Amino acid sequence: MVCSGAARNGFKGLMDELGDIVAVMVGVAVDGPYSYRVPAGMQVVRGSVVMVPLGPRSTLGVVWGAPKDKVAHNRLKDITRAYDVPPLSDELLRLIDWVSRYTLAAPGMVLRAALRSHEALEPEKPVTAYRTTGTIPERMTGARERVLDVVMDGMAWAKPALVGASGVSPSVIEGLVKVGALEQVSLPPPPVVQAPDPDFRPMVLNAEQQAGLDQFRAMAEGFGVALLDGVTGGGKTEVFFEAVADTLRAGKQAVILLPEIALTHTFLERFTKRFGVRPAEWHSDMTPVQRARVWRGVMSGQVRAVVGARSALFLPFHELGLLVLDEEHDGAFKQSDGVNYHARDMAVVRANLAGAKVILSSATPSVESRNNANLGKYTHIRLESRFADAQMPDIRSIDMRAEGPEKGQWIAPELAREIFATLDRGEQVLLFLNRRGYAPMTLCRACGHQYQCPDCASWLVEHRFRGVLMCHHCGHEMKKPESCGQCGAAESLVPIGPGIERIAEEAAERFPDARRVVLSSDMGSNAQIRDRFSEIERGEYDLIIGTQLVAKGHHFEKLTLVGVLDADLGLAHGDPRAAEKTYQILTQVAGRAGRAAKSGRAYLQTYHPDHPVMQAMMRDDSEAFYAHELEVREQGGLPPFGRLAALIISANEHEVAFGFARRLLAAAPMAEGVKLFGPADAPVSMVRGRHRVRLLVQSPKDFDLSGYVRFWLQAGEKVTGNLRVQVDIDPMSFY
């Protein structure tokens, strides 16, 4: 990755402007860059990646520009090294600044998302390969003959490939080198991925899809956002794949963000079928070496398309033309620890800075995105019918007040009858409950003791498959006791409520002949979960029992019946987004049914059939849901008509956290339209032994909420000891 001569000449002019003292942003929690000297003979520009001394150690940093304040030379340290890689683009540096200001995170911490380890900055080592010299060894064996037969094509072979092709041990190859029959040569490292071919296998779109693509293509040049709002199974992926192809033809780079790693495998297969090669991947399952190679490939421009998790947003693209967020409504796009950013919003910011396009794709768009489309800020592309001959599922409710299951069971009689009938036809059934484990609470029936996490304010969840009680907040677990730890009563512990393991137990009793699989995020590695999905697609299971892991992005042709066992579960929280989240998950999971030629049905077991969410589901009326939800939000001044910020104050002692929160509230500046709520214990008032107290800020939509909170914290009492203040601008979770 060596800069071209023209690029270097352009950078030289910038360097002259910077002078021999520069500001360097380092990847630590500091408020701004530090000043360093540029040694004689070293050339750096804004965006150059450098190594600098910081205290007793060296760390990576990025040249941010000229220092704001003049500092004497003798008080500065020298830059240790400037890496021979292209500088980070100006739009990426501006994005880091923007995210830092908006989220109140230290810019160095945001920079860490964009800057890899120093190994990623080193040039890749050449590959050692072997080719024939034409010399025939005096002693010929069968193994040697097989090797020489392989290399007769005149090509240079890497040792692992040559070993695999000839079926010999590495020592045979080394022996042939010693006798002069083979010679070692150095080859450039292979590309991390091949360039996708935009014309490999173009999609055959139906009239509605083609109209949507034409609508996207008609958008003005430069920055723009399109909301691709299509029903489940409506062919949204095919549309944005063609937009990716257009981007590649134009010589630009594209990135597709997915909310879940579990979705990646099937998606990559679809990408490969369309473009002839796999895209570069970016997610937590990759090894450090793989991530380093992709990072370098993106920076050099060798990598033209990336499919990855939310952090791919910060890759060092230089020719970014398109960002796609599939399932844009999904909560997984929100980073909830460290830097609290939302990838959907930051993708729009980065595209604006880069002059690129954004496609937000979803069958259940976020209320914010839908409102922007209503206002004309986003181009609204609709796909209102399913692809090919597939029909939308028939959705019905089961009123659990009148038609609930018998005591000790969780599957209502009407749903059970439908399951029997579906299985008899050789079709697949999905039972959905968004609750991991066997039971959410364990109770002693002798004394009433409830098992709670010692470090968190939450119940321990029984995981019967593993024989443990587990906290889903901190991971604490204990072996399930045989007697009550409070009163000592033997065999007195009873599970309260169902999790998917308990549903699986009931299903095994009621449908013993069905081939069953249980799926949730804690049941195996990502690779194992992907294997289960492949087996479901091949029809190796009849009855799938799962959490939200199975609710999105999957296409099971034999699946015709979905049963949601507790459709009200998401409504039982004091979350202003509860109705939206419930509608989204119910629509997504119901949409797994009938995605091929056979019609599908979905049954929602509910105690609130008259709730607006349930009514919208029954009538298949998304317009009614969004209209009602937007009206409720507007009346309450909630997003997208107002703004929220959450401040979580935590400490080892409750009194310390609560007292600081009171003093912080007293120091809050007055501002028109700003409302403050709290302090109050957070809904989960203790996590990992730290007590949590919450303050909420509500402001008008056009108010600089980030600036207000920043000013407030600077004016307030200094955070000392074990106190911590976590700021979440535009929170998605309220636990």
Image (tube, helix red, strand yellow):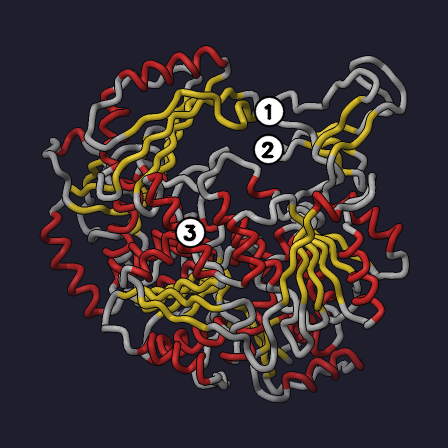
Upstream in sequence: badge 3 or badge 1: 1
Most foreground residue, 703 or 43: 703
**Crowdedness of circle 1 by 10 Å Cα count: few (<14), some, many (20+)?**
many
Name the residue carrying label 1: 456
Inter-mark Cα distance, 2 to 3: 33 Å
* 118 to 233, vertically: above or below: above
Is residue 297 among the parts visible in the rendering?
Answer: no
Residue 227, given in percent of the width and then of the height, sits at 38, 65
Q: In the displayed structure, does residue 328 sit left or right of residue 712? A: right
* 44 to 706, vertically: above or below: below
User: Are the residues at dot 2 and dot 1 in contact (C-beta closer than 8 Å)?
Assistant: yes
**Crowdedness of circle 2 by 10 Å Cα count: few (<14), some, many (20+)?**
some
Name the residue carrying label 3: 628
Residue 207, given in percent of the width and then of the height, sits at 45, 85
Looking at the rendered structure, the secondary structure element under dot 2 is loop
Res. 301 image quadrant: bottom left
Quarter of the image with the N terminus in it: bottom left
Give the foreground label among 2 and 3: 3
Name the residue carrying label 2: 473
Most foreground residue, 506 or 352: 506
Is residue 729 among the parts visible in the rendering?
Answer: yes
Q: Residue at x 11, y 34 (%)?
A: 69
Give the foreground label among 3 and 1: 3
Residue 408, given in percent of the width and then of the height, sits at 83, 39
